[in-house]
Amino acid sequence: MKHIYNSLALFTGLILLQSCESDLEKSYYSESQAKPAVLENITENIIIDNLKPEEVALSFKWEQANVGYNAAITNNLEMDIASENNFGNNKITLYSNAGKGSEVSLTNKELNDQIIALLKNYADENGNYTLGPTNLQFRVSSSISDSKSPLVSNIVSSLITPYDNESTGYKAPVITTTEIEYINLNATDVNAVALSLAWTPAYLGDNAGITYNVVINMKPEVEGYSILKKTTVATVKNQNNIDITYKELNAAVLSLLEKYDMSVSGNGTDIELSINATKNNYPVEFQSETITINVMAKSEDIELDYTYNNDIHSFSWTPLTGAKYQLEMSLNPEFSQRSVIASDIAEAKFDILSDVLNKAVKYQQIVLPEVSLSSPITLYFRVKAYYDNIVINSVSSVLKVQFTYTEIQDDTESIYFIGGYYQCVNDDTGDWVKEYAQKLYKQKDGSYKAQIMAYNLTNGWKINHGESWWGTPIVDGKMTLGGFDNNVTSYGSGDNTSYLVTFDTSTGKLKMENEEKRWKVIGDFNDYSLYGDEMDILRDNNEWYAHPHSDIELKAGEEWVIKSFMNGFEIHPSDVEGHFEKSKNNKFTVSEGGKYEIRWYFNKPVQYVVVIKK
């Protein structure tokens, strides 16, 4: 009997177990009531640090999915390349948890290894893949069984630069000059050597074209510490030693102090110095270990003076041996926005005409519309001194000047390039609006010319001058005068938006040159790649301009230009007027790091560029 009872118990248990398994396979939830996980935003741009493999590179947090009852939910954190197969077979699962876990962190090595695995999933037939900045997407997939489609969270994105984890022997430089603890920069001979540095060479694959940057920054415990505030003291290529003068090191230290809003201390300042190695087309900078040096910087005060005589504004200031200068103006004392009146000034003086100041005020008021230009207005001036265009050194006292602004009248004769293109149409009536239209401006030879950029040019356009209208047919390059309905629709196909247009009203001769699809801002910040955000074409207060779709993160000293996508036409500081800083290489630049909005007012007799620090 005991044997029979045991058999019955076993049979009953098997039935119960089978029943449980059947219920699990049929687990369900209401799709109308279920809520997927909500994934928090992550850092938008990451360069993985190969020298710190165990440090956290990226953390994810999410609000748990809710299926309407207390079920065991499995969460999968998934990664894929943006605009590829949309979390198809090539995706990578970074983390899987059958419980209530709702956050995970990945180290530099873990994240890098997973990205390399993902890139290999997209390799070509020869196993080749591109290692570089990669737009990646992440989501959380939540499920309660294999029989039910998972709940999918929102998608978050980041541009992440991995390193090559399969190249052996890559190594950072090692500083061999280590017995340096204190440097007093109050030297009589500023060109004497203050610091001699040597290091073992880095190895970046073939050691060809390695650039070494001597970099300083505050110690991490300093309030407001940021790696973006690091300052380059000097740069050399393909050598492993350098002599740095008192002038160069003092300029760099004063620049670093300015970034941290600090003053020269009587006890000196502790700084960290490293040698950073890089080479073209390699995404990772290899940094040596840091050494700490207490530096006694030399404070160099600059006093700024001003006189006015016969429409000439004359500035002079305390000279610094071997320095060059930059004269800046702002509409507010904080210099939150500033116009560079002149740079690369060799003498400690500079004269400005009122017309130059009127233009500078006009451009800056675009950035600061809350500032009234009713006369008189207060302008704020300061001078920055620098050496060899490497780093900004000292800033003068701020000088207030009362100025009577005169409205700049654009009296250049113009005609209208009017049509059904985007933002030239009344949204309510569909009529073309002359006040919205872009213009062509009269040239010395009597023709009219300008840069025209617009969406939907195939909707039709004409050229208007008073009562005269020119349109189609266009025969031998000449437009037809008269005929109100003869709109030009033969330009702008293939999403082309940009033309250099020249028109002669006496002959009807039309030139449509430099056809382009789009323009972009490229520079050091994106390795001059044309595959970033394109410039949007906008009209504001009947002023046409183009600007990048997103604000651009720029580091101090980085250079950039405006460039067309198809034919590589470039816009440089010498081509335009405006509110910006320029480098000695005739490129746009900034002397302070941060996010910037860049506006290119292209449809003007003289084009101008406005750079707005956010």
Image (cartoon, grey):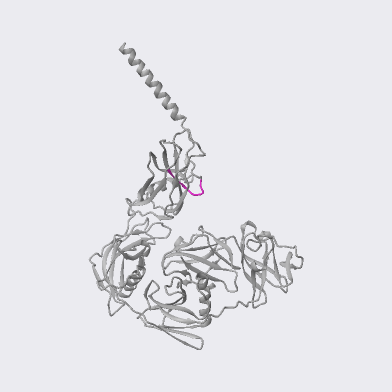
* Tag count: 0
Decide if residue 85 is on the left or right side of residue 454. left
Which quadrant would residue 345 be assigned to in this image?
bottom left
- Left or right, residue 394 beside residue 596: left
Q: Is residue 561 visible?
A: yes
Residue 83 included in the magenta stretch of the image: yes
Position of residue 78 relative to residue 405, above or below, is above
Side of 56 relative to 583 (left or right): left
Q: What x and y, as percent, mark residue 547?
A: 53, 64
Magenta: predominant secondary structure element? strand
Residue 324 placement: quadrant: bottom left
Query: In the picture shown, does residue 140 fall above or below 531?
Result: above
Q: Where on the picture, by quarter, is residue 317?
A: bottom left
Seen in the image, is 453 located left or right of residue 117?
right
Question: Magenta segment range?
Answer: 77-84
Residue 486 x, y percent position in the rendering: 74, 63
- Residue at (39, 21) in percent of width and height: 14
